[in-house]
Image: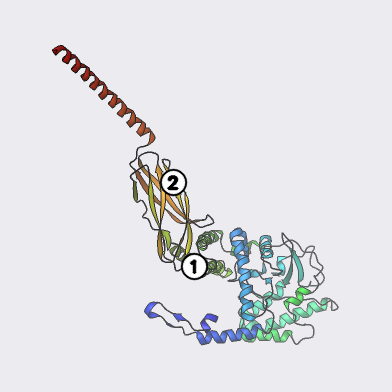
């Protein structure tokens, strides 16, 4: 939206023209700043990833959740000039233990969960517990703010049907009055957290906020005030993550495909200067593929994944081995040079390692050669090869990043050697020696015969 507010272009080539949304983007940003300035801001990780699914899929994508968390915090900090709450709010307010461990590693201090995520042990208490508790992680504890499952459902239902809005407001006020009446001398903090894609009408949202500020048994507080207050002393069981919630996650097969694209992007970034814009763009694409929004559109998720994969492959192919696959190189002696050409069609320099894998009868000197290639240039790399015998032998050439990660597809060259090997030389030498001895023997016999004939004639 910020980029749009500065003016932008749409279309391609001769069809490019100024975008029509500049004014709308500016107005939206102004309204956003005004709304955010009236309360605390909780930053979702960039693209709102399905943190439970990503954490379950393995370390590679779990690390992406940590990246998304830091990016989301930094983005809103720059946008609003303030520090957002370092809290996490998983989709549906539910998380398993691996998710909590991942969030803790990302620097999250407080997590907002549904009250059903930490069920009460030993039956329902005589009074509704406050929202503040703690949840253990592998390396420590996080503060936990539990949204009241019943009240959250009431608020969400009121937005789903406009005719039920006034009734939902009255029920919320009544439920809170009952909670206060359970023990009037014990003020408790209650958190209500509708779904992140909750879309109420402005009138309904305004009524909820207005009514909650008018009655004497409700005092609005911020999330940070709830987190700073005492924890409620009640025994809760381990994290509950329902099977129905797990079934909604991004599928394991889908995430395996995302992880494969991520490995290619890491290889691409490995040959570029640090902080390259194209690599950052692809990293953001991975975070978008992990969005929890794709739970509702799995077909759209696969389309986006395929689009990003094709874009990554096409871009990576701009740095490649230009030597033709299956081409033939002839060595006219025992040792010679095999030329390999590497091409860089990117707008930025790259640093690659050319790896050469010889065959059984071919020895290569210096199997790894590092080269820096300027933008839109190609460089020759001479590979010194020694043939142990004559014949045609394969030579596999592969690009690697400076850290040793494979880059792109290999190219196989064929090397023809016309030089004789050691065995052939021994056989040829022996045959030549026999031939020479035979010739010398015949010449000696002829000489002796000639001398005898000469003596006989005298």
Q: Quadrant of residue 163?
A: bottom right
Q: Position of residue 290 (x, y in %)?
A: 56, 66
Q: Is residue 37 above or below residue 130?
A: below
Read off the residue under disc 2.
364
Q: Which mark is residue 443?
A: none
Q: Residue 377 placed where, x, y %?
A: 40, 64
Is residue 53 at least partly visible in the picture?
no
Across and down, in percent, residue 283 comes to 54, 67
Q: CA distance from mark 2 to mark 1?
A: 43 Å
The quadrant of the image that shows the C terminus is: top left
Q: Is residue 172 left or right of residue 348?
A: right
Of the 4 image quadrants, the one containing the N terminus is bottom right
Residue placed most toward the observer, 361 or 111: 361
Q: Would you name the residue on which mark 1 appears?
A: 304
Q: Quadrant of residue 45?
A: bottom right
Residue found 21% across the figure and 19% down from its top:
447
- Nearer to us: label 2 or label 1: 2
Q: Residue furthest front?
A: 458
The local crowd at label 2, few if under 14, some if 14 to 19, many if 20 or more residues have their Cα within 10 Å, is many
Circle 1 sits in a helix, a strand or a loop, which is it? helix
Q: Residue at x 56, y 59 (%)?
A: 252
Is residue 16 shown to the viewer in this render? yes
User: With 444 as the anchor, is 134 left or right in this view?
Assistant: right
């Amino acid at each position: 939206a910020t980029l749009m507010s500065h003016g932008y272009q749409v279309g391609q080539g001769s069809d490019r023209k100024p975008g029509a949304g500049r004014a709308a983007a500016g107005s939206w940003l102004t309204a956003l700043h005004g709304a955010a300035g009236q309360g605390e801001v909780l930053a979702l990780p960039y693209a709102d990833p399905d943190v439970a699914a990503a954490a379950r899929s393995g370390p590679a994508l779990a690390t992406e959740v940590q990246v998304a968390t830091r990016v989301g915090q930094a983005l809103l900090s720059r946008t609003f000039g303030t520090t957002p709450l370092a809290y996490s709010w998983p989709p549906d307010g539910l998380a398993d233990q691996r998710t909590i461990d991942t969030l803790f590693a990302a620097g999250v201090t407080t997590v907002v969960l549904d009250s059903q995520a930490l069920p009460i042990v030993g039956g329902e208490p005589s009074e509704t517990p406050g929202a503040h508790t703690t949840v253990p992680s592998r390396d420590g504890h996080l503060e936990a703010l539990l949204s009241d499952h019943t009240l959250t459902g009431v608020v969400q239902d009121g937005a789903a049907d406009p005719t039920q809005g006034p009734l939902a407001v009255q029920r919320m006020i009544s439920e809170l009055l009952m909670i206060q009446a359970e023990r009037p001398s014990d003020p408790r903090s209650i958190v209500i957290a509708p779904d992140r894609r909750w879309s109420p009408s402005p009138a309904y949202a305004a009524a909820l906020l207005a009514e909650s500020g008018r009655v004497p048994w409700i005092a609005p507080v911020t999330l940070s005030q709830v987190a700073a207050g005492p924890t409620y002393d009640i025994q809760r069981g381990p994290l509950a993550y329902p099977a129905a919630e797990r079934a909604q996650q991004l599928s394991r097969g889908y995430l395996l495909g995302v992880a494969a694209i991520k490995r290619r992007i890491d290889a691409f970034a490995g040959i570029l200067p640090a902080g390259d814009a194209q690599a950052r763009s692809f990293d953001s694409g991975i975070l978008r593929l992990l969005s929890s929004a794709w739970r509702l559109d799995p077909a759209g998720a696969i389309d986006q994944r395929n689009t990003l994969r094709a874009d990554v492959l096409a871009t990576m192919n701009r740095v490649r081995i230009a030597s033709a696959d299956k081409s033939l190189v002839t060595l006219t002696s025992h040792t010679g040079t095999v030329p390999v050409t590497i091409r860089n069609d990117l707008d930025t320099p790259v640093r690659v390692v050319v790896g050469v894998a010889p065959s059984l009868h071919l020895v290569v000197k210096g199997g790894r050669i590092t080269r820096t290639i300027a933008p839109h240039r190609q460089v020759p790399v001479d590979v010194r090869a020694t043939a142990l015998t004559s014949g045609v032998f394969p030579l596999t050439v592969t690009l690697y990043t400076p850290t040793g990660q494979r880059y792109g597809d290999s190219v196989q060259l064929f090397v023809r050697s016309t030089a004789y090997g050691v065995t052939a030389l021994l056989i040829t030498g022996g045959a030549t020696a026999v031939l020479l001895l035979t010739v010398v023997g015949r010449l000696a016999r002829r000489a002796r015969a000639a001398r005898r004939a000469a003596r006989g004639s005298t």
